[in-house]
Image (spheres, rainbow, N blue to C red):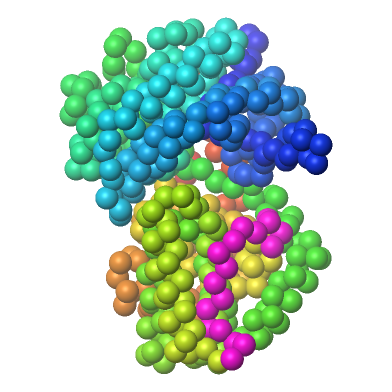
């Protein structure tokens, strides 16, 4: 039997555009783990990627790239504000991240979300070949599976949620909660990052829709009977392109850059690193506050230790993010004002984007990576750090509230809300015998290398296709 063609549907196309001097537009493949994972599969299956190009008020022609068809879905400026910044990132994002910030509920946002999801479903119905497999990505498009099934019942439909899926006490706050559930249940397979997310979904569906579910024998999710169909629900923790990061970390220019970075920092005995999007879910303030208290307590010496905090700009038009940036910058200024010397800051704060090689050099230059997210679907920075440490050096302080914590049990696990516990974990990571940290890193590297992003894609698509893989996290 011929292999099914594959269609990936995501909010964004995996491309970046550059406007040349003559006004023409050139397109290039954007970096990223999801693109790296799906590119070979899409190429082999003559696949199509459907998404927004990033252009406002137009749907420019995006050429096919590396054997993959690109199909652009338009967004108006009003839809960008109401569907993307509004319902997706003002309602769903904060609610699904434990309401770290208060979600807002506006009817016009919901109406735009419905309208844009319908447009994505129609575009997919128009472009998908008969009996194709369609893999819909993330919280922006939760209504698409059911809309698409109504248009094209011949398709095999999968949905994957990249961010956490909340427990009932949070999800029940949503005014249109039943529509969102029914939208996702239009899929044949609904995937989450963790068993907890899959279990939350099954419990809420049974409670709100009065459907029957059979739990997975291995835990996490199960099978839901709805509208005469069986929907599989399970955990498929996403990962990174380990080979790419290892290759970067071994490049002589990257190794040299790491040494130069330490020299630029004043050749301290220890370097603590944070690499995050500037987002209120990442716990950046908690980390910086813990570092300041360690300096005040004298448990970390100014002359010996520096912190480097990379905060990649994020959603800068949204007020929450402007406020967060101001708070972080104020706290960094306070620490440097109290403990720094002329030309020698204690915290090096970088509110900018970096290329992959520079990030790999930062990973190599640091002694401890701190990941203090208050809630995170996975946290791929933690996995990147592990992949980059081909020398088995470094130590990882990792929040219990990341999806990665379920896999990376050899990290120094912390509750970022417990400031004393966070401080103790940072000190332990800094002062642990090198043999202990090497043993932890070796164990985590073994796991990440055997659970890379390609293994994730294979596992999910095998389950979607009805193959032998069950809808559960790889062991």
Residue 61 point in image, percent of width and height: 68, 23
Asked if 418 appears above or below 443 in the picture, the reply is below
User: In the displayed structure, does residue 287 sit left or right of residue 261?
Assistant: left
Residue that sits furthest to the front in the current view:
22
Residue toward you, 236 or 446: 236
Magenta run includes residue 346: yes
All told, the count of numbered labels is: 0
The residue located at (22%, 32%) in the rendering is 175
Asked if 113 appears above or below 456 in the picture, the reply is above
Residue 35 point in image, percent of width and height: 63, 37
Residue toward you, 157 or 93: 93
Residue 381 point in image, percent of width and height: 54, 56
Residue 207 appears in view: yes
The residue located at (30%, 26%) in the rendering is 181
User: In the displayed structure, does residue 211 sit left or right of residue 109?
Assistant: left
User: In the displayed structure, does residue 130 sit left or right of residue 289?
Assistant: right
Magenta run includes residue 112: no
Residue toward you, 149 or 433: 149
Question: Where is the N terminus found, in terms of image quarters?
Answer: top right
The residue located at (68%, 56%) in the rendering is 355
Residue 305 point in image, percent of width and height: 54, 85
Part of the protein shown in magenta: 342-358
Residue 220 appears in view: no
Asked if 424 appears above or below 170 in the picture, the reply is below
The residue located at (49%, 84%) in the rendering is 336
């Amino acid at each position: 039997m011929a292999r099914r063609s594959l269609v990936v549907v995501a909010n964004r196309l995996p491309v970046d555009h550059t406007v040349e001097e003559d006004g023409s537009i050139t397109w290039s493949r954007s970096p990223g783990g999801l693109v790296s994972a799906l590119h070979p599969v899409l190429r082999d299956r003559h696949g199509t990627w459907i998404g927004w190009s990033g252009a406002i008020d137009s749907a420019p022609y995006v050429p096919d790239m590396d054997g993959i068809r690109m199909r652009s879905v338009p967004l108006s400026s009003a839809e960008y504000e109401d569907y993307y910044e509004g319902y997706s990132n003002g309602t769903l994002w904060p609610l699904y991240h434990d309401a770290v910030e208060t979600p807002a509920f506006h009817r016009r946002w919901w109406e735009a979300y419905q309208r844009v999801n319908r447009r994505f479903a129609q575009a997919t119905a128009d472009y998908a070949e008969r009996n194709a497999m369609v893999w819909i990505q993330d919280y922006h498009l939760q209504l698409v599976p059911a809309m698409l099934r109504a248009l094209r019942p011949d398709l095999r439909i999968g949905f994957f949620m990249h961010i956490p899926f909340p427990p009932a006490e949070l999800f029940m706050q949503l005014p249109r909660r039943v529509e969102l559930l029914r939208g996702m249940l239009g899929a044949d397979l609904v995937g989450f990052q963790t068993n907890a997310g899959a279990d939350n979904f099954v419990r809420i569906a049974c409670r709100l829709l009065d459907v029957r579910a059979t739990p997975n024998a291995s835990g996490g999710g199960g099978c839901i009977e709805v509208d005469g169909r069986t929907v599989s629900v399970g955990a498929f923790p996403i990962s990174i392109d380990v080979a790419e990061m290892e290759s970067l970390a071994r490049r002589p220019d990257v190794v040299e850059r790491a040494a130069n970075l330490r020299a630029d920092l004043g050749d301290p005995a220890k370097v603590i690193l944070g690499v995050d999007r500037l987002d209120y879910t990442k716990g950046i303030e908690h980390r910086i506050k813990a570092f300041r208290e360690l300096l005040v307590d004298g448990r970390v010496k100014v002359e010996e230790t520096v912190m480097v905090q990379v905060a990649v700009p994020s959603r800068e038009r949204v007020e929450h993010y402007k406020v967060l940036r101001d708070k972080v910058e104020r706290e960094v200024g306070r620490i440097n004002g109290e403990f720094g010397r002329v030309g020698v800051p204690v915290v090096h704060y970088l509110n900018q984007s970096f290329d992959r090689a520079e990030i790999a050099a930062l990973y190599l230059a640091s002694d401890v990576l701190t990941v203090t997210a208050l809630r995170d679907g996975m946290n791929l920075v933690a996995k990147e750090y592990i992949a980059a440490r081909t020398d088995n050096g470094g130590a990882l302080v990792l929040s219990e509230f990341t999806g990665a914590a379920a896999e990376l049990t050899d990290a120094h696990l912390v509750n970022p809300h417990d400031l004393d516990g966070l401080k103790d974990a940072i000190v332990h990571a800094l002062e642990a015998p090198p043999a202990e940290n090497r043993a932890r890193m070796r164990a985590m590297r073994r796991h990440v290398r055997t659970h890379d992003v390609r293994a994730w894609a294979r596992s999910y698509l095998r389950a979607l296709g009805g193959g032998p893989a069950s809808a559960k996290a790889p062991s």
